[in-house]
């Protein structure tokens, strides 16, 4: 339950409690039914005027750093080889928990003459499973 709804619910419960103390249980029930009816009417009224809506969403990579350690481009962007961020330019984590753009780490691993190492911590590079 959102904080705003919780606050309204708490206030409504307090009002019902006061009505019950002052006027008895039947009056409190009448008050509660009236509040529910009023809420339903307001929602139906609002839905009559709702003609369109716009959804908004955002996403971020769940990485410890904000930039790729190889190309120094932001993870919410893309590597220099890609035009758009997202599924075509995913992040790849190593066993050491360092993250890189897929294309950046593949270039790095392929450029190593011997065993590839993580560009950040120099541990032997292994893709995280």
Image: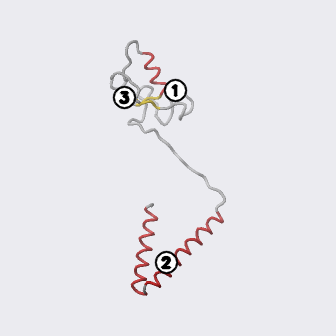
Residue beneath disc 1: 80
Q: Contact, CB < 8 Å: mark 3 with mark 2?
A: no
Other-residue count near label 3 (Cα within 10 Å), few / some / many at <14 / 14–19 / ≥20? some
Q: Is residue 116 above or below residue 43?
A: above
x and y percentages locating residue 116 in the rendered image: 38, 18
Residue farthest along the bottom direction in this orientation: 23
Task: Tell me the residue at 39%/28% (across/down).
Answer: 94
x and y percentages locating residue 13 in the rendered image: 42, 74
> Is residue 60 found left or right of 50 in the rendered image?
left
Disc 3 element: loop
Disc 1 element: loop
x and y percentages locating residue 19 in the rendered image: 43, 83
For marks 3 and 1, the one nearer the N-term is 1
For marks 3 and 2, the one nearer the N-term is 2
Disc 2 element: helix
- The answer to which quarter of the image holds residue 52 is bottom right
Quadrant for the N terminus, please. bottom left
Disc 1 versus disc 2: nearer the observer: 2
Give the number of the disc on residue 32.
2
> Is residue 57 found left or right of 67 in the rendered image?
right
- The answer to which quarter of the image holds residue 98 is top left
Q: Is residue 34 above or below residue 109?
A: below
Q: Alpha-carbon distance for marks 1 and 2?
A: 61 Å
Residue beneath disc 3: 95
Task: Tell me the residue at 43%/19% (across/down).
Answer: 109
Q: Contact, CB < 8 Å: mark 3 with mark 1?
A: no
Quadrant for the C terminus, please. top left
């Amino acid at each position: 339950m959102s904080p705003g709804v919780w606050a309204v619910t708490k206030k409504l419960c307090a009002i019902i409690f006061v009505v019950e103390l002052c006027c008895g249980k039947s009056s409190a029930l009448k008050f509660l039914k009236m509040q529910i009816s009023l809420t339903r009417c307001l929602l139906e009224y609002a839905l009559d005027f709702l003609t369109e809506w716009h959804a908004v969403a955002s996403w971020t990579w769940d990485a410890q750093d904000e930039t790729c350690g190889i190309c120094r481009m932001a993870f919410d962007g893309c590597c220099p080889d890609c035009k758009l961020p997202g599924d075509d330019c995913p992040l790849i984590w190593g066993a050491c928990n360092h993250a890189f753009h897929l294309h950046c780490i593949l270039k790095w691993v392929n450029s190593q003459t011997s065993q590839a190492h993580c560009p950040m911590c120099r541990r032997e590079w292994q893709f995280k499973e």
